[in-house]
Amino acid sequence: MTGRNLPMMNRERLIVWIERLSLAVLLFLLVIIPIHNFNVEWLMGGVLVLVSLRIIAATLVKRLILPWSRLHWIVLAFLAFCLVQLLPLPFSAPPWSFGHSFDGLPVDPARWSYLTVDRQATVEAVLRLALLVAIFVLVPILVRSPGRLRLLVNWLTGVGFSIAILMILNRFSPPNQPLLGGAWPLGFYFRRLEYPGLLEMIFPLPVAMVFARGARRDQVILYGFAGVVIGVVVATAVTQGSLMVLIAELVAFGLLSASGRRPSRSLSPRRARIGRLLNTIGVTVFIAGLLAGVVWTATRPISQEISKDVEEELRGLMAIEGQPVQRAEHARLVMWKNSLQMFAEHPLVGVGWGAFATGYARYDTAPGFRRLRAAHNDYVQLLAETGLIGGALLVLFLIALVRLSRCGWASPSPFGRSVALGASLGCFGILVHGLVDFYLQSMANAFIFAVLVAVLVVVRQLDAHYGAGRDRQDTVRR
């Protein structure tokens, strides 16, 4: 039976169920991907289900609503460029490319006509990127009302809070019997090094909901408590860059809140003073909770971890200057130097998206065999893998992201403003951490990043549709 033959009442009911099922699949992915991020099967299956449901819904309503922005064009252009790296091109390899292929037997450079040095790695990376682009396109289609957006924010906060609680419990378990060590049922695997980046992105959401007044009164304490718990785990994470990101997010939030605060003409001076006093008390309690949680849950001094990192980077700096130093190849500065040398020899198109580990072997100065899969700097690695073309698209992406964020900060709705502030600061945090680490190369973290960027698109489209009065429409609509 086709959409034309279905009675109107049954068709509308079916569309409602498809919308609800699609939203349920998205929420399921937000739970399953963070705890199963070593492969793409779950995300691929979820994307296929969502696309199928959207096709059925579009057939029934005889139209396809596709929210679009400049960011969509930029990410599609980047995806197209990565696909070009996989195509056999009808000309010889340029002189600044490798003289042989690392993913096969040595061949004559004149016959090597691929821009990537590792086709299999690039295929896998392009597949992951395509799935993330699909999520970026699908989220604004599924979240088309303030109620659904509030549900999504609550769900993200709940996922972050749950992971943070599990990580705190894991710290207090015996060293030889970790609570979350090893494999879980159904193939789930706990890896504590992956979760600080995810929590860095979620942390600003509850903070913004509380202090930017996007939360309802009965939810303020819940959001505040979730923010404290998530912040404590981020501050005491194994990677010291997380503490830097947490401070950067809080400072950026304070600056944006101060610059965007508008005096309300409807409030009397007395009520305005009471509001400022309550806000000051809330900030004080929040900071005190963070400090108390850090003191309670930190299993080793943070200063000790920072000094160890500084010592390692000093060894790397000495090695770059030509001084003999042991184990300097593990320093980030040495990795960046070698990666930039790779970029210098492949300046236009790089060695191939996802092919960093294969290409780096030629420049690695460490003795013995070592496969380094990341440069510990997302921007340096992107230049090495995609060259100036990828770097230019990254700059365009960041500019478009800032513009989209500013549109959200100017939302007439306190809820929309809070969500945009939290989502943009979450993106800001992981992008800052990308200067010294590679969290965005984790499927779970990249998935949450794509969802947060899509949330900014949702805020803009809700502002355009509902306007200033959309908080009164805060219900789940089909």
Image (tube, helix red, strand yellow):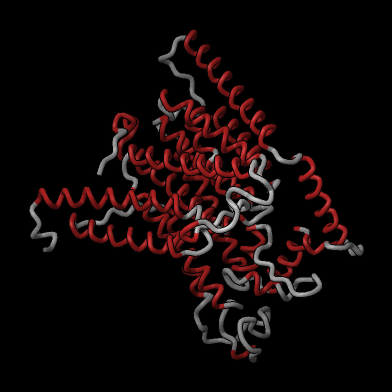
Question: In which quadrant of the rendered image does the C terminus lie?
Answer: top left
Above or below, 110 relative to 30: below
Residue closest to the eye, 43 or 171: 171
The location of residue 185, given as percent across then percent down, is 48, 57
Residue 410 position within the rendered picture, expressed as x and y whole percent measured from the top left: 45, 34
The image quadrant of residue 257 is: top right
Q: Residue at x 36, y 55 (%)?
A: 138
**131 in relation to 400, above or below:** below
Front one among 380 and 243: 243
Asked if residue 283 lies left or right of residue 300, the reply is left
Q: Residue at x 30, y 40 (%)?
A: 465
Instruction: Residue 51: give x, y in percent of width and height.
Output: 32, 61
Name the residue: 60% across, 47% down.
196
Above or below 9: residue 379 = below
Query: Furthest residue to the right?
Result: 323
Looking at the image, residue 318 sits to the left or right of residue 442; the answer is: right
**The quadrant where residue 288 appears:** top right
